[in-house]
Image: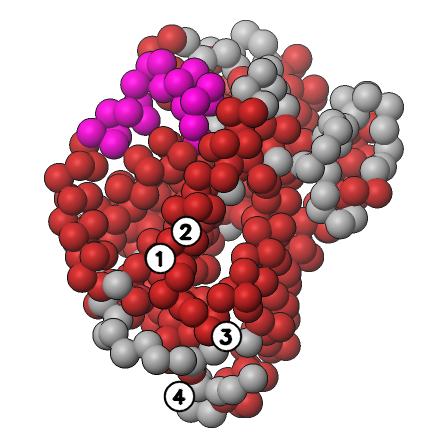
Amino acid sequence: MAVEIETSPTARAIAESRRVANLDLLRVAAITLVVMLHFEVTKVLVWPAALNVFHQGWIGCELLFILSGWLVGSQFWAELKRAGTVKLGRFWVRRLLRILPPYYVALVPIAAAEYATRSSNGVLFDWRYLLLLQNLWGENPIFAHAWFICVQVQFYLLFPLLFVLLRKHMRSFAYVFPVLLVTPIVLRLMNIHDLIGLNYRATYYRSDGLILGMWLAYLANFRPVAMERLYRAAAWLWPAAAAVILWPFSSFFLLKCFFLVGSLCFAIIMLAMLRAPSFAIAKSRPVEWYAAASYSIYLTHVPTLHAYRLFILPLARKLPVIAHLLLGCVLVALVGAAFYLLVERPGQTIRKDLVEDAAAAADGPTGEGHV
């Protein structure tokens, strides 16, 4: 496969290092938006109009999709560029071992707790949750916020199959990506009446951000000239993109129209952050820790807030709103950190032993190998 174009400096940095400080800061912002939204969804707090951005905290998922597509895509395309192919089996195993063990560990107690508190509509279990298919049809009777995890798993299982079909014609990806981006828009317009059902959580409606992130990673590796233009444009456009995200009516506009609008705005902000010097706060230990534990926090924050509402809120109703916010955030952080230390990080160590070290031994010191 002839791929002779040199990788851009930013793409090399992403491929060589899994941690980019400014992207950690974006991940922290994304998770914070999602957590703030669920403070209201779980009825712990009601946000005033002045904090409208927390009402639309669901946009944090769009930012997480962009970041995931960019980071996973950067590794995917960098391997293709370096070795001339991608070991799909290893790619799938690496992705699944990253996502599934914490998900399954969280699933059982969350399902049991929701059933015990009668918030699961009387459903103790649903077989779709074992295969992460619960977001594709019907309702999500338990563990509702896991739709986000389903979208990622399904996308990363299916996208490489498209790569297999087109790998002998790599330049065709320049045309395939726009088609992939348009497809969710067309499907949503055909189902515009269902804004908060499947239109909100099904992979075939919500893959915009992942596709866009993968496309940007592709351009960074194989079209550096075009990517350089995007970086320069992002440096000028990021204030407008931020204004769209913060616009008080953006939640209704983005939800009713196209999630892609939000994804484009966050993509612009991400590209601007990649070229900006690392912020001091982005390199701080709390941000690094929060970003590392972001998946654990996502998995556990909703049941944690439900527990706060059931057991702590009734005992401390006289406390001011700011106190409940601080206490809730501390509890979410503690539970997420405990889950990260006890479940997610040991799983990452096992994954490294099973996949990364074995791959390094098989590929040699350069990391190059063949199928």
Q: Residues within 10 Å of mark 4 (few under 14, many from 20)?
A: few
Could you give the CA–CA distance between mark 2 and mark 4, rounded to whole angstroms? 30 Å
Q: Position of residue 273 (x, y in %)?
A: 24, 48
Residue plotted at (45% across, 60% down): 72
Give the residue number, with chain letter if any, for mark 3.
86
Amino acid type assigned to the residue bearing label 2 in the image: Phe
Task: From the image, state whether disc 2 or disc 4 is nearer to you.
Answer: 2
206 versus 326 height, above or below: below
Give the residue number, with chain letter if any, for mark 4.
366
Quadrant where the image shows the N terminus = bottom left
Could you give the CA–CA distance between mark 3 and mark 4, rounded to whole angstroms? 15 Å
Residue plotted at (30% across, 35% down): 265
Task: From the image, state whether disc 2 or disc 3 is nearer to you.
Answer: 2
Mark earlier in primary sequence (2, 3): 3
Mark 2 secondary-structure assignment:
helix
Query: Is 329 covered by the magenta stretch?
Result: no
Give the residue number, with chain letter if any, for mark 1.
174
Amino acid type assigned to the residue bearing label 4 in the image: Thr
Amino acid type assigned to the residue bearing label 1 in the image: Ala
